[in-house]
Amino acid sequence: MTDENTAGKRKGCGPVLVFMIAVFAMTFGLLVGAGGLYAYLYFTDDGVERLNIAEIAEAPPAAPQTDEPADDDDVYAMAYPLLDSINVHASLDEDTIRNHISENRELLQKCYEEELERAPGTRGEVDIQFSIRGNNGEVATAVIRNNRTGSEQLGRCLTRAIQDEWSFSAPDTPGVATVRFQSLFFPLRPE
């Protein structure tokens, strides 16, 4: 005998619930598998050799940070402004600021090259802030907000270069516009 309320209804789970269960099972399986591999490698002395993953497991040796000059002269000083980190406080066009920083990064590069000659192990991130005068577009001040390179000389060179060399079209704002961005500095050496 069939009840009128259940006639025509399907039994079982809906497709959304089946999909959610499948995603959960797959995620759980991956986590258990990764955890098991980690535990195996952690608790066995020869797990890396047994699995033939020695090349993958070995991390490349870290470059020593030293103030000694590098043996080779083929070191490229990489100054990389993080354009997504730009924060503009005023009615300035952010794309114009981003393009200006990108097109004029050779000043950042030059400061870093000078620093690498003095201290070849210098690397890290620097948070830079500068203010633009509304009446003429000149950089009024430049300061380092956070210097993770450990080099005060690099910071002084960056602020001096930005303040002395960069200029923008006069913004449509009275007073001062503030711009803040981050830049990475790291040496590249040929293999």
Image (tube, helix red, strand yellow):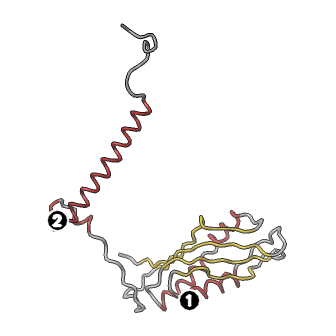
User: Which residue bears the numbered disc 1?
Assistant: 152
Numbered disc in front, either 1 or 2:
2
Secondary element under disc 1, as helix, strand or loop, is helix
Secondary element under disc 2, as helix, strand or loop, is loop
Above or below, 24 relative to 17: below
What residue is shown at x 82% (from left), y 75% (from top)?
Answer: 175
Placement of the C terminus among the 4 image quadrants: bottom left
Percent from the top left, x then y, of residue 111?
57, 84
Percent from the top left, x then y, of residue 16?
44, 33
Separation of residues labelled 1 and 2 (CA atoms): 46 Å
Q: Is residue 137 left or right of residue 114?
A: right
Question: Quick one: label 2, few (<14), some, or many (20+) residues within 10 Å?
Answer: few
Above or below, 151 relative to 179: below
What residue is shown at x 43% (from left), y 85% (from top)?
Answer: 121
Residue sitting at the far top: 1
The amino acid marked with disc number 1 is Glu
Percent from the top left, x then y, of residue 169?
78, 71
Above or below, 189 relative to 154: above
Q: Quadrant of residue 3?
A: top left
User: Which residue bears the numbered disc 2?
Assistant: 44
What residue is shown at x 65% (from left), y 82% (from top)?
Answer: 143
Above or below, 151 relative to 55: below
Percent from the top left, x then y, of residue 181?
62, 72
The amino acid marked with disc number 2 is Thr
Q: Is residue 32 left or right of residue 99?
A: left
